[in-house]
Image (cartoon, grey):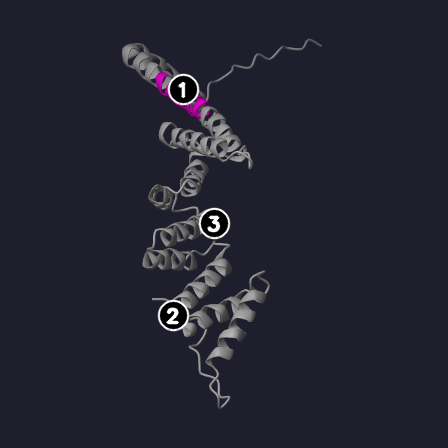
């Protein structure tokens, strides 16, 4: 018995026909718009090259800034205790290097720390005005770094005190208390308490010390704050033995 070989005719489905038609249309369109296609490809290539170039440039800037910062930090640390002139000269060289980082590489990762260290170094060479300017610039430029900002505000307050501006110092101290991520609030409360004592305002000092002990009982300053509170309360106790009422804790008594 003979078998007939069946020949199946392959039919192109509508989807395949549509796909082929679409590809053909794309090729025809590209051919007709060859100039525009080439311009688009060239533009994309240039954009990619620009991004790569910018990343490469930023990496080089970061490296240069990090090298300068390292040199400045080394000069700042390498200050002989037995040679005051050499120590001062090294600190001045460190200041110059910190300035270069800040001014020549403002977008680098090292610029932020360099600006803070610049303020510290300027205060150390008794350029308190320059230190205030550096700290203030840090606050204006890096206001989102709340953890570091607390320390900067504290140093700014110390600089204002050295400059004889107690009102500005208090404002800088109180700014720390509004920062949710600040880790030095206990130190600030202690400094505000001491400042109130120096102004002969024991009620205000007690309020700050009470806040410190209540909110930060595990702070290394809580013990000294307690001692100061007892001393102030003893001074306020009249001969009859009735203690003078101090303002409630939590109220910022400093004016």
Q: Does the rendering let one see residue 27? A: yes
The image quadrant that residue 27 belongs to is top left
State the extent of the magenta-drawn residues as a range: 46-61
Horizontal and vertical percent position of residue 19: 42, 21
Badge 3 density bin: few <14, some 14–19, many ≥20, Cα 10 Å: some
Residue beneath disc 2: 253
Q: Are marks 1 and 3 in contact (CB under 8 Å)?
A: no
Kind of element beneath mark 3: helix
Q: Which tag, 1 or 3, sits closer to the chain's start?
A: 1
Q: Are marks 2 and 3 in contact (CB under 8 Å)?
A: no
Q: Does the rendering let one see residue 109? A: no
- Residue found at the far right of this picture: 1
Residue beneath disc 1: 53
Horizontal and vertical percent position of residue 101: 41, 30
> Residue at 38% of width from left, 16% of height from top?
45
> Residue at 47% of width from left, 54% of height from top?
182
Membership of 21 in magenta stretch: no
**Image depth: mark 2 or mark 3 in front:** 2
**Image depth: mark 1 or mark 3 in front:** 3
Kind of element beneath mark 1: helix
Horizontal and vertical percent position of residue 26: 35, 17
Badge 1 density bin: few <14, some 14–19, many ≥20, Cα 10 Å: few
Residue beneath disc 3: 147
Membership of 55 in magenta stretch: yes
* 72 lies above or below 2: below
Picture quarter with the C terminus? bottom left
What separation in Å lies between label 1 and label 2 (alpha carbons)? 55 Å
Q: Which mark is residue 142?
A: none
């Amino acid at each position: 018995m003979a078998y007939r070989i069946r020949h199946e005719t392959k039919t192109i489905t509508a989807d395949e026909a549509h796909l082929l038609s679409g590809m053909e249309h794309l090729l025809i369109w590209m051919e007709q718009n060859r100039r525009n296609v080439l311009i688009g490809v060239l533009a994309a290539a240039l954009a990619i090259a620009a991004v790569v170039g910018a990343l490469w440039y930023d990496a080089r800037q970061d490296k240069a800034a990090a090298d300068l910062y390292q040199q400045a930090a080394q000069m700042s640390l390498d200050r002989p205790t037995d040679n005051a002139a050499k120590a001062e000269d090294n600190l001045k060289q460190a200041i110059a290097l910190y300035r270069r980082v800040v001014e020549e590489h403002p977008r680098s990762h090292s610029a932020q720390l360099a600006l803070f260290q610049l303020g510290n170094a300027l205060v150390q060479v008794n350029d308190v005005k320059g230190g205030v300017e550096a700290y203030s610039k840090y606050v204006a430029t890096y206001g989102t770094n709340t953890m570091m900002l607390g320390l900067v505000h504290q140093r700014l307050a110390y600089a204002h005190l050295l400059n004889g501006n107690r009102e500005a110092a208090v404002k800088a101290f109180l700014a720390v208390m509004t920062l949710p991520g600040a880790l030095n609030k206990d130190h600030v409360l202690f400094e505000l308490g001491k400042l109130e004592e120096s102004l002969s305002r024991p009620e205000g000092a007690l309020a700050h010390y009470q806040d410190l002990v209540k909110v930060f009982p595990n702070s290394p300053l809580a013990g000294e704050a307690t001692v100061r509170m007892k001393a102030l309360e003893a001074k306020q106790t009249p001969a009859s033995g009735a203690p003078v009422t101090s303002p409630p804790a939590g109220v910022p008594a400093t004016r």
